[in-house]
Image (cartoon, helix red, strand yellow):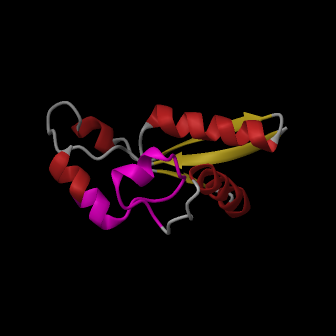
Amino acid sequence: MDKATIKFMPVIYKDEHLHQASQGIGATECRVFGNTEQQLFENIKEKIWAMSSEAVILDEATAKRYNQWIADSWKTSVPQCINNMGQRDMRFALPYSETFKRWLRKNN
């Protein structure tokens, strides 16, 4: 059985009433499992979609293979970090750029 630990950072919102608590909780880690690497990657992709926040796979080798798998499925290359909504919606497990974080704070 394959497994991966993913670190999720809180979603960035500007709403000081409803969403301020999500910013204050800090990062969360969770483990994702799969019987095969393919199933593991599908489960990671689903978890990133469900959590809808900045996500990083803690094992570098697994992160590299997963992000390449995502890039291959979209026929693109792996970015250094998430720079826009399109890259975020591809479900890469990469940190958000500071520019994208500022954009989210302004537009979310």
Q: Residue at x 22, y 39 (%)?
A: 20
Q: Residue furthest front?
A: 75
Q: Residue at x 31, y 38 (%)?
A: 22
The answer to whether 57 appears left or right of 105 in the picture is right
Q: Residue at x 25, y 51 (%)?
A: 104
Q: Residue furthest bottom?
A: 80
> Is residue 48 covered in magenta?
no
The answer to whether 11 appears left or right of 106 in the picture is right
Residue 98 vertical placement versus 19 (above, below): below
Image coords of residue 67 (percent x, y)? 61, 56
- Total numbered labels placed on residues in the image: 0
> Is residue 97 covered in magenta?
yes
Regarding residue 28, the answer to whether it shows in the image is yes
Q: Which residues are magenta?
A: 81-102
Q: Quadrant of the C terminus?
A: top left
Q: Quadrant of the N terminus?
A: top right
Image coords of residue 85 (percent x, y)? 35, 50
The answer to whether 53 appears left or right of 35 in the picture is left
In the rendered image, which quarter is residue 11 located in? top left
Q: Nearer the viewer, residue 27 or 57?
A: 57
